[in-house]
Image: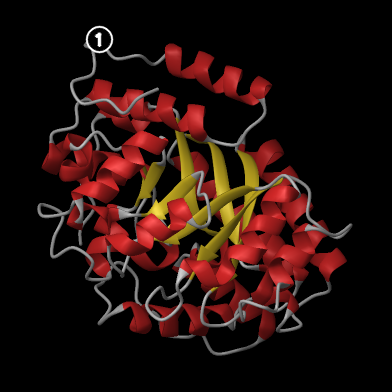
Amino acid sequence: MPPADASPYLAGLPKLELHVHLEGSLRPATRARLAERHGIELPTVGQGVAFRDFDGFIAAFIAGMRLLRDESDLVTAVEALAADLAASQVRYAEVTTTAWAWLHEKRCHPHAYRDALAEGRRLAAVDHGVELRWVIDIPRGFEAPDAQLTVGLLDSPQCPEAVVGIGLGGPEIGYPASWYRDSFERARAAGFAALPHGGETAGAAYVRECVDVLRADRVGHGVMAVEDPAVLALLVERGVTLEVCPTSNVLLGVAADIESHPLGRLRDAGVAVTLATDDPGYFDNTVTGELALAQRHHGFSDADLHAMQLHAVAVCLADDATKARLRRELAEHAPQTGPTNAAPA
């Protein structure tokens, strides 16, 4: 799916990215660099093309993970993602990383994982002007619900600095959110936000379970909520924001095309959304491009998309000083006309 051309206003607009997977962000140049570093054959993975289904994407994702072998690769991945984010004028990002893939598969020890994320985050700020926070997710289909490896890391001295939430990714069907209630309750008690995926490849009931059972602060994707007006009303009532990833949804077959994507229906129902890239190394997309798609195909104005960034500031998990800085910069980039369909700020 070709990216939409962005207006000069959207290209220059300061942005937040609240749904991007570190391990899914490796673009071809980074993959080639890692393959050369380790003297291994570069795996063939799709980029910017439709996958046959979600399982096909997971297979490609696992193939790409073979390039990530140790903590130096982790730093490389963070640096490369930060450069991409900076190119889209992203000032702040909450980046999901899957600790299970590093620790269970023995790519590095917990202290090395912690230190590599810290170094990558430092370089992102110093070299690219991007402030990062981390979300560590449980991979459904890999980490058993009772294993509690992910939450065990969060609730330990080896927890990386600047982790703000626990996530839940991977295949939804066959892995209901309720199975992970104990991990989310333990994480919440330790001070972490609940940021599960839900309603991406499964129906509206999975979104409801994220909200009712896991007490989600935000829900990743959530687009299948449009199947049930009661779930849409629940999202509005609870003030739960959806992290919507249109290009990802189209390339994974969640939506047939960008024109029929549920984004417009979510807006019309009053559901608050942010726009994000998900796995840009596979989907060949950018935050700026996602905003441009919303503008071109769903009628979002410059003012609507500016208001969306302000809403992202409100629901992100940054400290108050960082939020104040982001609001000041967005105030300097306010459009000339008011929003028509803005998310609540």
Residue under circle 1?
Answer: 336
Q: Nearer the viewer, residue 127 or 51?
A: 51
The residue sitting at 54% across, 90% down in the picture is: 41
Question: Where residue 271 sits: x, y (%)?
Answer: 29, 38
Question: Where residue 267 sits: x, y (%)?
Answer: 21, 37
Residue 273 is at least partly visible in this image: no
- Residue lying at the far bottom in this picture: please name it: 41
Left or right, 106 with respect to 19, comes to: right
Question: Where residue 260 sits: x, y (%)?
Answer: 10, 55
Left or right, 226 with respect to 291, comes to: left
Which secondary structure lies at badge 1?
Answer: loop
Give neighbour class at mark 1: few <14, some 14-19, many 20+ (Cα, 10 Å): few
Depicted 113 relative to depicted 161: above or below: below
Depicted 98 relative to depicted 217: above or below: below
Give the quadrant of residue 222. Answer: bottom left
State the quadrant of the C terminus: top left
The residue sitting at 30% across, 30% down in the picture is: 10
Residue 214 is at least partly visible in this image: yes
Left or right, 95 with respect to 339, comes to: right
State the quadrant of the N terminus: bottom left
Q: How many marks?
A: 1
Task: Check disc 1 and give the amino acid type.
Answer: Gln
Question: Where residue 136 sits: x, y (%)?
Answer: 64, 59
The color scheme shown is secondary structure
Q: Nearer the viewer, residue 238 or 3?
A: 238
The residue sitting at 26% across, 54% down in the picture is: 225
Depicted 221 relative to depicted 315: above or below: below
